[in-house]
Image (cartoon, rainbow, N blue to C red):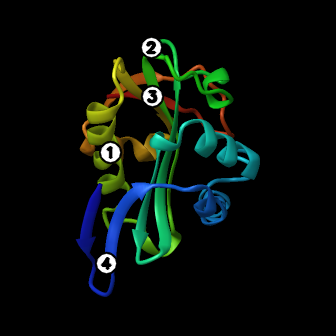
Amino acid sequence: MYEGESETRKTCIRILRSDDIEQAYMLETEGYPADEAASYEQLVYRQREAPQLFLGYFEGSKLIGYVCCTKYPGPHLTEQSMKVHDPSADSVCIHSVCVAGDKRRQGVALKTLTCLVQHVRKTQNGIHRILLICKAYLIPLYTRAGFTLVGESNVIHGKFCCHNITY
């Protein structure tokens, strides 16, 4: 999907395989509070059911960031959309955007999100939108990636208010 060079290693963005899930889970638990992080089983489910929507950013063989999604019908991300994948749905729901702590603020999330949007446009017929919820401090990241703030979300995820974002 994407290949490049960092200062020291080859980088690439590719679809995560089942043997990458352990690294993804480590990033998930590092990047999210316990009440927001996906379980190992949820990541396994999402990779198994929607592998084409689980993209990882690698430096060499090390996963340093990823975007994890499933499909769900309708114009809004819901609590239910975090639990299931409907292959015939018209929305892609982003559940996790994770980057290793020492690699944050270096463009990894933005590159991975941009690649995801391009990948969805090229490979996912019938998709009308890409949805996510985020905390207020992350809105600038998503708007730089071309997403639009819709407003406050009804979904309760963690301790703080979330916002609906769409592409």
- Give the label on residue 75, or none: 2
98 lies above or below 36 = below
- Disc nearer the start of the sequence (1/4): 4
Residue at left offset 42%, top offset 22%: 151
- Disc nearer the start of the sequence (1/3): 3
Q: CA distance from mark 2 to mark 3?
A: 10 Å
- Disc nearer the start of the sequence (1/2): 2
8 lies above or below 62 = below
Q: Which residue is mark 1?
A: 140
Q: Quadrant of the C terminus?
A: top left
Q: Tell me if residue 10 can be seen.
A: yes
Q: Quadrant of the N terminus?
A: bottom left
User: Could you tell me if the residues under marks 4 and 3 are in contact, i.e. CB atoms within 8 Å?
Assistant: no
Q: Which residue is mark 3?
A: 92
Q: Helix, strand, or loop for circle 2?
A: loop
Tag 2: amino acid: Pro
> Which of the two discs, 1 and 4, sits closer to the camera?
4
